Image (cartoon, grey):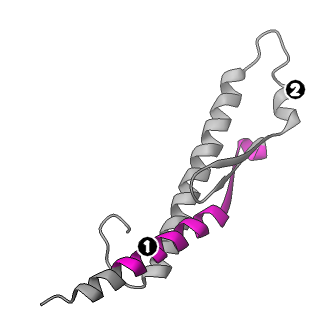
Amino acid sequence: MINPLKISEMLSQANHMQEEVQRKLGQTVVEASSGGGAVTATMNGKKELIKLHIDPAAVIGLSGEKPDVEMLEDLVVAAVNEAGRKADEAMQSSLQGMLGGLKIPGLG
């Protein structure tokens, strides 16, 4: 028979673990660049974009008769997507560390 007190204790531990994971994800910061550093995206572990830096040299190239705005947009997308991948890796690593050797589907 399952002890109801144990279930309550397990749920409490799960809630505590979830709060800890959310706290860690908020404190985790990852950074990714594209275009040789022309664009740098900084994101937290919750995949919230914290900062986007565009090197002024990348913008100077836009001041012409036919500016290549599309190239700059592509660099921004690439940097943000790479930062998102790094945030996913950081989250997965953090969860694996907290959960020890537990095999949970979808977590690697």
Of the pair 50 and 37, the residue shown nearer to us:
50
Is 30 situated above or below 82? below
Contact check, label 2 and label 1, Cβ < 8 Å: no
Of the pair 50 and 64, the residue shown nearer to us:
50
- Looking at the image, residue 61 sits to the left or right of residue 41; the answer is right
Q: Name the residue under label 2.
A: 60
Looking at the rendered structure, the kind of residue marked 1 is Asn
Q: Is the magenta stretch mostly helix, strand or loop?
A: helix
Q: Position of residue 71 (x, y in %)?
A: 68, 27
Q: Name the residue under label 1.
A: 15
Of the pair 86 and 26, the residue shown nearer to us:
26
Q: Where is residue 84 in the image (x, y as percent from the top left)?
A: 56, 51
At 54% from the left and 73% from the top, the residue drawn is 20
Q: In which quarter of the image is residue 60?
A: top right
> Magenta stretch containing residue 22, yes or no?
yes
Q: In which quarter of the image is residue 75?
A: top right
Q: In which quarter of the image is the C terminus?
A: bottom left
